[in-house]
Image (spheres, rainbow, N blue to C red):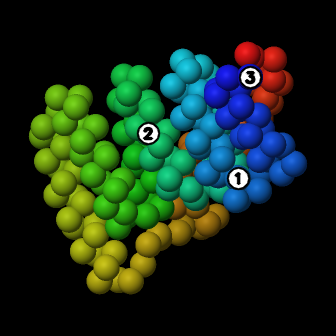
Amino acid sequence: MNNITAARAIFQRGVWERPSHPRTVELWTSWALLEERCGDYQAAREYLRAALRAERFSVWARATWAAMEARLGDFAASRQLFEDALRIDPSNRGVWSAYESMERAARRPQAADQIATRALGSMSQAGALGTKVSLKGDGLPSGLEAAERAAAAPVSYTHLRAHETDS
C-alpha cells in the first residue's frame, strides 16, 4: 500500500459513517486536494460538493474550491466561488487575499485592485457592524442560490470504492 492509497483509506474511514456531518468538511476538502494533486479533478469536485452538503456555509471549502479552479484555469468558476465565500464572511482576509492573488495571476491587475478596495471596505463595514453574514429570506446569503443547488446535487460515492484497489 502506497501513501496515496493509505491516505484515501483514512479519508474514506473518516467520512464513510456520516458523510454529511458538518465536522467532515475538512476531511472532504482535504481529500479533494489529494485527488487534485493526483489529477482526478472530477473526484476533487465531487468531494468539494460533499463538503458543501455537509456544511453549506463553509467558507473554507468554497475558497479551496475557488483556488483549485484557478489553478485549473477556470477563472470564472473561481471568481464565483470566491464571491460566494465572501457573501458568507465578508471580513475574511484570507479569502480576499487569495481572490486578489488569483486576479493578479490571471493578469487582471485592475480587477485585483478593485478586489483590494472592496476588501478594505467590506472588512471595515463588517467590523463596524459587528456582523459576518447578512441573510435574506430563506436563510441563504444573497447570490448563493446556485451554490446551494450545486451542494444539493447528488454525490456519487463511486470514487470511494474505485480507489480501494489502488496500489
Disc on the earlier residue, 1 or 2: 1
Q: Which residue is farthest front?
A: 1
Disc on the earlier residue, 2 or 3: 3
Residue 124 placed where, x, y %? Answer: 24, 74
Name the residue type under label 2. Answer: Ala
* Residues at marks 2 and 3, CA–CA distance in whole angstroms: 32 Å
Q: Residue at label 1? A: 24
Judged from the image, the secondary structure of the residue bearing numbered disc 3 is: loop
Q: Nearer the viewer, mark 1 or mark 2?
A: 1
Residue at screen point 53% across, 26% down: 36
Residue 118 placed where, x, y %? Answer: 22, 58
Residue 42 in view here: yes
Q: Residue at label 3? A: 1
Neighbor class of circle 1 (other Cα within 10 Å; few <14, some 14-19, many 20+) is many
Label at residue 92: none
* Residues at marks 3 and 1, CA–CA distance in whole angstroms: 24 Å
Judged from the image, the secondary structure of the residue bearing numbered disc 1 is: helix
Please determine whether, in this image, residue 105 is positioned above or below residue 134.
Answer: above
Please determine whether, in this image, residue 157 is positioned above or below residue 91.
Answer: above
Q: Residue at label 2? A: 66
Name the residue type under label 3. Answer: Met
Name the residue type under label 1. Answer: Thr
Are the residues flagged by discs 2 and 3 in contact, CB closer than 8 Å?
no
Residue at screen point 47% across, 43% down: 64
State the quadrant of the N terminus: top right
* Residues at marks 1 and 2, CA–CA distance in whole angstroms: 19 Å
Q: Which of marks 3 and 1 is in front?
A: 3
